[in-house]
Amino acid sequence: MEQRDDIIEYSLDNHHSEEEGKKIRKKIWKVTLILSIVTLVEVFFGAMVKQGSSMWLTVKVLFILLTIVKAAYIVMTFMHLGDEKKALKWIVLLPYLIFMIYLIFIGLAEGAELYPRMH
Amino acid sequence: MAGHASKEMKANKVDWGGKTSPFSVSYGKLMMWFFLVSDALTFGGFLVAFGLTRYSYGGAWPIGEETFDALPFLTGSYPLAYVALMTFILIISSVTMVLGVEAGHRMDRKGVTKWMLATIVGGLVFVGSQAWEWSHFIHGTNFGRVELSDGSVATAKGEFGKIHDFEIVRPGSHYEGVGTKITNDNITAEDGDLMHAFQHAAAKRKLSGTAGAMMITLHDGTVAKVNKEADKDLQLIVKVPGKDYAVSSAADESTRIHEADGSVDLYYEALSKGNVVYGANLQENEYGPQTYGHFFFFVTGFHGFHVSIGIILLIIVFINVLKGTYEKRGHYEMVEKAGLYWHFVDLVWVFVFTFFYLI
């Protein structure tokens, strides 16, 4: 295949050295530890705190926050989105977040509205 | 790492002036990200629909730590232990994947081979775990869900007393001899095993009598006495209220119907009337509203489908790594792109885990 000179081969620029690799691997293991601990904390609270108890609302909010923490580590570190250019980072995150926040709001509001009508 | 600007990029100060990619990534990687955004919207839609439906049912929705408390080869209750294990397996496979991507950036073919193999194994273990979980969900618990005489609907918890044998009272066409004991050794294939025959009979109104003295009618018309140990600590958790019983609160176990409140008689009365559902299918399930079963099969199924596709993609990339395709190409970006998809699958599971099992 003939080499096109108007296309920049970005893939070749993704390489890093042995020392950089060491640093990156260290970061990966750190994130692994964080994700494992967060999962254990979630399971612990899930098994210990029963739904409907006075603590439940707090635990529920904690679950959602911890989930977002986990998701952020996966997307930013494992998927390298944190290391990409700002333009790419926001073009992926912003439209998605705006739409999902809207959808969650409207979904839960509709669900609460449906409840008295269905019972 | 990713996103280093090339020399040519640095010379060109204007990002959006053409010729260069304003994102400093290759076309393939950018398109993978766009695909993942659209796929994330699909899963987001499912989970929001799940939330909407659950909200519209008020409190009458199954509770994760009550529904998912089984472990393979063990009896007893281990709330959420199995799903936590599955979550952990998937997280670890995500770690091995990112280590593979890192090795690729150093052109370390051996490292890529090793970590990709580990990732594929992790993915297969996860799909296998999900198969077990589906099988358990479909077959259900020993007790099932019963409709009590006052019209309330309850699930039962406790230790199911072992069935020793069925003692023939009136032989049918397959079994002979009054007083002969049917055990798992001489039961016909049609009846399966003792437990299966018992549940089948219960659901088909072919059980009668009270807790200590149940009579069963088998497939061939044989009538037999059920020799069964007493259940231990049988509790009924009321899900839908009837005339006499209110809904049990998950937070307060004293609101359940205990043995002292007559749970045994209530349960076996329901069994003898055939008012019992075991396991789950697309028409009914023992765990909660019918929609719950649909969402379980659809959301976890769609995720499992993604994992399966991911494993196939990883195997294809793995073969190319072995063949040296990417070594020749000069970069391992294909590993990175497959990795993006794999991490996404892990990411979805993190949300499914929280909203389906924890909350």
Image (tube, coloured by chain):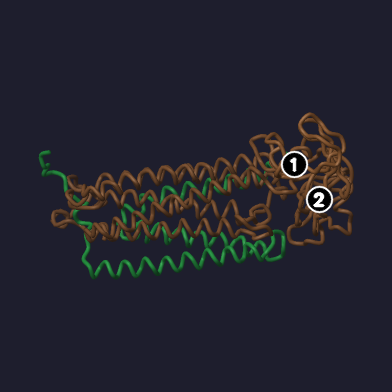
* Chain represented in green: A
Determine the chain carrying the residue at label 1. B
Badge 2 is on which residue?
B228
Q: Nearer the viewer, residue B147 or B214?
A: B214
| Residue B75 position in % (x across, y down) | 67, 57
- Determine the residue positioned at 26% across, 46% down: B320
* Chain represented in brown: B
- Determine the residue positioned at 44% across, 68% down: A33
The reply to whether residue B194 is in sight is yes
B20 to the left or right of B44: left
**Front tag of 1 and 2:** 2
Q: Nearer the viewer, residue B236 or A54?
A: B236
Q: Nearer the viewer, residue B269 or B39?
A: B269
Mark 1: amino acid = Gln
- Determine the residue positioned at 77% across, 49% down: B163
| Residue B118 position in % (x across, y down) | 38, 56
Report how far apart the C-alphas of labels 1 and 2 lie in the structure: 13 Å
Determine the chain carrying the residue at label 2. B
Badge 1 is on which residue?
B199
Classify the position of the N terminus of chain B by image quarter: bottom left
